[in-house]
Amino acid sequence: MKNQVIKAIRNVVVTMMDRVMERVLIEDPFVVEKHHANKPLYAALVPDEIFKGSHFERRFVTPFGNVWEELAVKVATAHHGKCVQGATIEGTVGGESLRRIQEVLNKLEHKTGRLQRQKPDWTAELEYIKAGGGEPLPVSVTCDILIKSDVTGKTYSFELKGPLPNSDQTKVSKEKMFKLLTMNEHPVDYAYYALPYNPYGKREQYDWSFPNRWFDMRKDECVLIGEELWNFIGGNGTYQIFIREINQLGVSYKERIYREFLCIEPPEGFDKNTLK
């Protein structure tokens, strides 16, 4: 199973990086003459190499946004057996529970009279919403990732975002999670808000303000960050495999980018900046 996880990680990352390299070297290379013609003022003030770097960045960042979900699906399928991306779940939620969902979200987003914005508390919020009940109303939710595990027999939904998500997308994710867990049909056993890695290091140090408005990112049990996420979807040790494979691939691709795209020799120590 670990070999399948390793293969899944390498396949997704290599496919994405090879596609980026093909674009910047063959399909859409940086042409100095075109840059000079289109932006003569910039070219007069700033070295061409700066814009050559930004040319690569734009063609790298956009496809990378889809890699996390694709990677999670491949890894989870290797470990759990069944995982799909963009699954739509339909069911019913009581009208009072739906009202309470909006009440909770509003209190997290806005001051109420003289009261400050409410601090997030996933367990208390979910318990309050579930107690609402009411007349069943149809609801449809599309999950980023849905795992139906052959290992545990449980169904897990994931809202998988980048490591520094914005406030609006986090609010939408929390609303979706509430609806999934209050559906009368109980289509999922657990719902998680997940980030692929932690730029702050440890869980207790995570300090990006936007998701912190909606979740207690350090304590809420529905939040999975970095190692917690990858070990959950791929089994114990998956995060270390992920780190190792990314760092190994990074050395070879950095060397290619220096030589083939920037047309310079890699500087001393170029391979020292690794993911931890």
Image: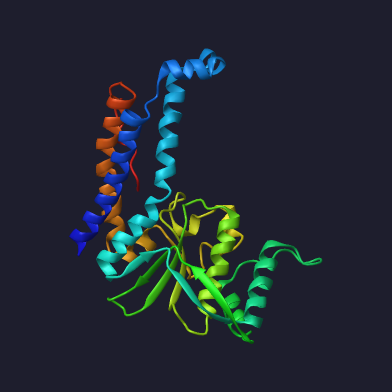
Residue 49 in picture, x, y percent from top left: 42, 21
Whether residue 123 is visible, yes or no, is: no
Up the image or down, 153 lies above or below 78; here it is: below
Residue 216 location, quadrant: bottom right
Residue 97 location, quadrant: bottom right
Up the image or down, 69 lies above or below 43; here it is: below
Task: Give the quarter of the figure containing the N terminus.
Answer: bottom left
Residue at point 31%, 40% (across, down): 19
Residue at point 61%, 85% (across, down): 131
Residue 206 in picture, x, y percent from top left: 50, 55
Find the residue positioned furthest to the top: 44
Up the image or down, 253 lies above or below 5; here it is: above
Residue at point 44%, 43% (across, down): 62
- In the picture provided, is 215 more to the left or to the right than 47? right
Residue 139 in picture, x, y percent from top left: 56, 75
Residue 118 in picture, x, y percent from top left: 68, 67
Most foreground residue, 157 or 114: 157
